[in-house]
Image: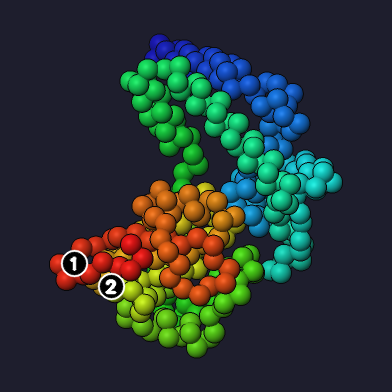
Amino acid sequence: MMRSLLSRQDHLQQITVWREFNRVYTARLGLLRARYLDSKFSLTESRILYELLLEPGRTATALRKILGLDAGYISRLLLSLSKRGLVQQTSSPADAREKLLKLSAKGRDVAQQLDEHAGEDISNMLRSLDASRRKMLVASLARVHEILRNPPSKIEIVQASLKNLAAVRSLLAEYYDALNVVQRDTPTDVGKLLKEPNAGFWIAYMGAMPAGCVVLRPLSAQQLAGECKRLYVRPAFRGNGIAKALLDRLETFAVSRGLMWIYLDSKDDLHAAIQLYRQRGYRMCKRYNDNPQATLFLRKRIGKSPHAQSHKNE
């Protein structure tokens, strides 16, 4: 009985501490104001703009899952943002019931301004702390995020073979449509890729569902180098670390094949992907291919070789 009473008291104390923290940080971050960062937008509208800045082509369903919003509410917000010329909606080739969402030029400007203002606010708060307290705060926030995130489902990364051809084709088709890819792999290209010993196509499964993919292929124009292509995670599975897991497997395979460098290309508006690449150590380099849609070119050194010469992209 006494043990049960103490347990209940502990639980109530934990609730009190949590709620007190909520009261402090919501006021400190200005979340109680009618408009976020004294802009013309609510916090929810600002968050939608930010998510679309990070990843154009998301659907309303994907946004609803990410933000935990009611379907009717997010539809009304998207309609309002569209009427203001900030968000553009187009039908999804994969599902006519869904709309692909992206920011207009005006929307990107607004989202970037809000993002910069938010960064300045946090920077000012960090400057008010000395170095040791700042380090403690950031580490604590990272720990809280780790504890509170939904327990991730088990991710299984499989190197595809011809028996996975249906999943390969389905993922590639979605990827091409999502990014409006011009240079697409032919069925013959895909077949060769699945059989090539120094190349690979990896599929991430969550349960029985193919959730994402990535490709590594030899880069003949560069010595001891491969190219990362077709990194894609289906919208419903994003936020589970799948892209990182796929890149981990690709880079491990590349090292096992004696490669020194991984190259990749991207586009300026793929902010989430570019951020991920930079976090993993990919750095800007000169153009190395003829992809007409690519605007950024990056590479990462993954191995060492006493016989390797400097790359002409250095």
Q: Residues within 10 Å of mark 2 (few under 14, many from 20)?
A: many
Is 120 drawn above or below residue 154 in the view shown? above
Instruction: State the mark number for residue 74.
Output: none
In the image: residue 107, left or right of residue 66: right
Residue drawn 50% across and 68% down?
230
> In front here: 86 or 24?
86
In the image: residue 76, left or right of residue 270: right
Q: Which residue is the extreme one toward the right?
A: 83
Quadrant where the C terminus sits is bottom left
Q: CA distance from mark 1 to mark 2?
A: 9 Å
User: Where does residue 260 sit, x and y in percent of width and height?
Assistant: 27, 66
Task: Look at the numbered disc 1 and give the secondary structure of its residue.
Answer: loop
Colouring scheme applied when the structure was drawn: rainbow
Residue drawn 49% across and 53% down?
274
Asked whether the viewer can see residue 25, the reply is yes
Tell me whether the residue at label 1 lies in contact with that at label 2, contact meaning CB atoms closer than 8 angstroms.
yes
Instruction: State the mark number for residue 305.
Output: 1
Quadrant where the N terminus sits is top left
Is 34 drawn above or below residue 86 in the view shown? above
Answer with the quarter of the image where residue 140 lies: top left
Is 88 drawn above or below residue 7 in the view shown? below
Answer with the quarter of the image where residue 285 lies: bottom left
> In front here: 163 or 190?
190
Instruction: State the mark number for residue 224.
Output: 2
Give amino acid for label 1: Ser
> In front here: 273 or 1?
273
Answer with the quarter of the image where residue 312 lies: bottom left
- First reached walking from the N terminus: tag 1 or tag 2: 2
Give amino acid for label 2: Leu
